[in-house]
Amino acid sequence: MMAIVLITGATAGFGEACAKKFAENGYNLIITGRRQERLSQLQQELEKQYEIKVLPLSFDVRDEQAVSSILGGIPEEWKAVDILINNAGLALGLSTIDESALSDWDTMLDTNVKGLLYVSRVVMPWLKARSKGHIINLGSTAAKAVYAKGAVYCASKAAVDSISQGMRIDLLPYHIKVTAIHPGAAETEFSMVRFKGDSSQADNVYKGIKALSAEDVADTIYYCASLPAHVCINDLVITCTQQANAYYTYRE
Ligand code: NDP
Ligand code: 8X3
């Protein structure tokens, strides 16, 4: 079997763009997300276009039982994962702590932090057994600087930053790389999800800037994954040229 990349959150945005980029480069793919129909469509499209195999797995990363039974139960040959891209995640709402909905916090923390941990806990033994591999975690510029009304999303991504550092130490004896990628504003479904379908609020995020695209981020992830075995990019912040960090953006 050719090299395998496992991508969480492959039904949209960065995850979908990564699936296409790695497929184009001959990787077999395990693609996950909750929207089964999108996973099936992507599987069909990529298997038709490239000489690769795609295993679609539909589960919610917040559901520990589903993660361990569905992901943990895949056929042995698929457990030879070379690269895990922990990408599934989201922001919900933009408000001060006292005005936030409790359910938004639960969803963000359960998805971005605990979901990433559940998936990693299943996959890490597979990587360790082969003493090779690469885990790529999607943080954010929000991990590096906190912006107004974003305390909980920013905290969830700061946790991804810390978890990535911890994983790297845990995995040193196994020659396994850990990379945290921290993108700034990128035009995907992210803002429509954050603002719960309010397209005018979502569009405002990208007003007056040429934001990153999902493909820009996927190309960068692919670059990190293509370096020689002894070279690891540990931490990478990528923004569009009009953005300096999570709160300074120059709009025209
Ligand atoms: P999108 O909304 O376009 O895609 C998010 C993906 O995550 C979807 O495939 C979605 O799949 C999946 N997902 C969300 N919740 C769950 C869940 N509970 N279980 C399983 N899968 C889930 O967003 P992006 O591509 O922009 O975001 C990808 C990652 O990058 C996120 O972690 C985000 O926080 C981060 N990021 C985004 C930035 C941006 O500006 N766009 C910038 C910096 C970081 P489905 O709904 O089918 O389950
Ligand atoms: C996504 C980037 O700044 O919109 O993580 O929160 S931001």
Image (spheres, rainbow, N blue to C red):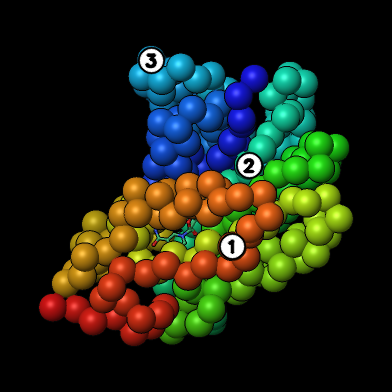
Helix, strand or loop at mark 3: helix
* Left-right relation of 119 to 104: right
- Whole-Å distance between the Cαs marked 2 and 1? 14 Å
Mark on residue 83?
2
The residue type indicated by label 3 comes to Lys
Residues at marks 2 and 3 touching, judged by CB atoms closer than 8 Å: no
x 58%, y 68%: residue: 235
Horizontal and vertical percent position of residue 174:
83, 50
Q: Please name which of the two marks, 3 or 1, marks the residue nearer to the observer.
A: 1
Horizontal and vertical percent position of residue 128:
83, 43
Horizontal and vertical percent position of residue 24:
41, 31
Q: Earlier along the polypeptide chain: callout 2 or callout 3?
A: 3
- Toward the viewer: 171 or 232? 232
Q: Find residue 125 and report its image quarter.
A: top right
Pointer 3 residue: 48
Pointer 1 residue: 233
The residue type indicated by label 1 comes to Ile
**Ligand 1 contact, mark 3 (Cβ < 8 Å):** no
